[in-house]
Image: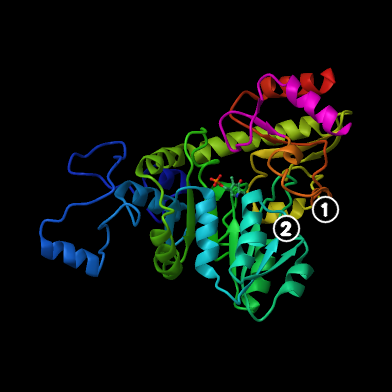
Amino acid sequence: MKNLHTRTQLVHAGTRRSQYGELSEAIYLTQGFVYPSAEAAQARFDELGDDEFIYARYGNPTVAMFEDRIAMIEGAEAAFATASGMAAVNGALFALLEAGDHIVAAKALFGSCLFIVDTLLPQYGVEVTLVDGTNLDEWRAAMRPNTKVCFFETLSNPTLEAIDIAGVAAIAHDFGAKVVVDNVFATPIFQRALTLGADVIIYSATKHIDGQGRCLGGVVLGDKDFIRGPLETYLKHTGGALSPFNAWVMLKGLETLDLRVRAQADTALKLSNALENHKKLARTIYPGLKSHPQHELVNRQMEAGGTVFSLEIIGGKAAAFRFINALEIVLISNNLGDAKSIITHPATTTHSRLTAEQLADLGISEGLVRVSVGLEDFGDLLGDIEAALNSG
Ligand SMILES: *Cc1c(COP(=O)(O)O)cnc(C)c1O
C-alpha cells in the first residue's frame, strides 16, 4: 500500500477481512473480546500483539482499520482514533504536557481548543503564551526553556490565515518542543503537515472525513513512540475512544474524501473569484485567491485553498443576518466540510464566547460570515449567494 497513491490508499488501506471475505469493511460492534483460554487472556494482558484486542476503549478492529487508513495517507507511523475532534486535542495536549511545562499557541483557535489552552491547562500548572500565529518573530520570542508544545490551526477559523508550519517547526525544534497541528481546515488531502515539519496532527473527523454530517470523531497522528506510548496510555484510561460504528462511517467517508474535497475546493475557488468584487462585500477571504495576503505561503504548503471561504458583508450584523436569512440552498449551521453548503455567523455563534476586544483582534467583525462549500452545483450556489446579497 505504501507506494500507491492516496486515492488507492483511501479505498483499501487498513482493511481487515474476516473469514467471510466481506467486500465492505465489517463493523465489529463489540466492546469486548473472548479468549480461548485463561492462559491466552493472561498472555494478551501481559503483552498485546499486533491486531489483538482486549477492550474497545483500548482498541477495536473497525477502529483500527480507520486508524491504519488515515495513518497511511498522512505518512504517519501510527494513529489513535477518538470520540470527537476535541477528545483528540485534549488527548494530544494532556499527553504531552505536565505541570511546570509551557505551551505556545496561536490565538486564532477553535473555541473549545482555546478553552483547553487558556483555561484548562493553566488549572493543571501549565504556563501558556498566545501569539499571532502568522508572525514567526512572536513564536520565537515566546519560546522558553520549558516550552514543550507549539500548537496551532492552519488554516485558522474563520479568517483563514495560514501559519507557516515549516517556520514554526524550525523554531520549536530549536527548543526541543513538539509541533501539534490541528489540520481540520486544510484536510489531509491538501496539506501534509508531517512532511512540513509537524510532529503531531489532529483532526476532527466530524468535518470532511465524515463529510455528510452524521457522526462525531477525531484522530491523533504521529510517531509510534508517542501514539502507542503516552497518547494511548492517556486516552485508553480517560475514555476518549471512538465508537466502532462511528469508525465505520469515517472509514467509508475516507473512501470518497479526495473526490469530495477536491470538488468542494474547486467550487469554493470559483465562487470566491466570482464574488470578489461584489459591491455588497468589503472582503472576500479565500486562501486560493491571489488577493489572499499569504497567497505565496498557501501555495507553498497547500495543494488547494480548502473548502471554506469567508465574506465580510458591508453593513455589519444587520446586513449579515439579512444575507444569511435570504439564502435558500446554503443552510444555516455550524458544521463544515459537509456535502451540504453551510453558512455561519461566527461573532454570534462559534466565537460568541470571545470578548469584543478578542473578536476585533482576530478580525472577526459583525459583518463576517463563513461559508463551507458543499457538493452542490456551482451555478446554483452562485445564484443563491448573489440573489441573497442583492436582496438586502
Ligand atoms: C470542529 C473542530 C474541532 C473539534 O472537533 P469536534 O469533532 O467537534 O470535537 C477542533 N478543531 C477545529 C479546527 C474544528 O473545526
Q: Is residue 285 above or below residue 76?
A: above
In front here: 377 or 84?
84
The answer to whether 120 appears left or right of 392 in the picture is left
- Specify whether residue 196 is in view: no
According to the picture, the residue beneath numbered tag 2 turns out to be 107
According to the picture, the residue beneath numbered tag 1 turns out to be 361
For mark 2, give the secondary structure.
loop
Amino acid at dot 1: Asp
Q: Is residue 90 above or below residue 313?
A: below
Q: Residue at x 64, y 39 (%)?
A: 307
Alpha-carbon span between mark 2 and mark 1: 9 Å
Residue 325 part of the magenta-drawn span: yes
Report the residue that reaches farthest toward the bottom: 145
Do labels 2 and 1 touch, CB within 8 Å? yes
Q: Which residues are magenta?
A: 315-344
In front here: 57 or 335?
57
Q: Is residue 307 above or below residue 221?
A: above
Amino acid at dot 2: Lys
Q: Residue at x 11, y 56 (%)?
A: 36
- Give the crowd class for mark 1: few <14, some 14-19, many >=20 residues within 10 Å: few
In front here: 208 or 271?
208
The colour scheme used here is rainbow
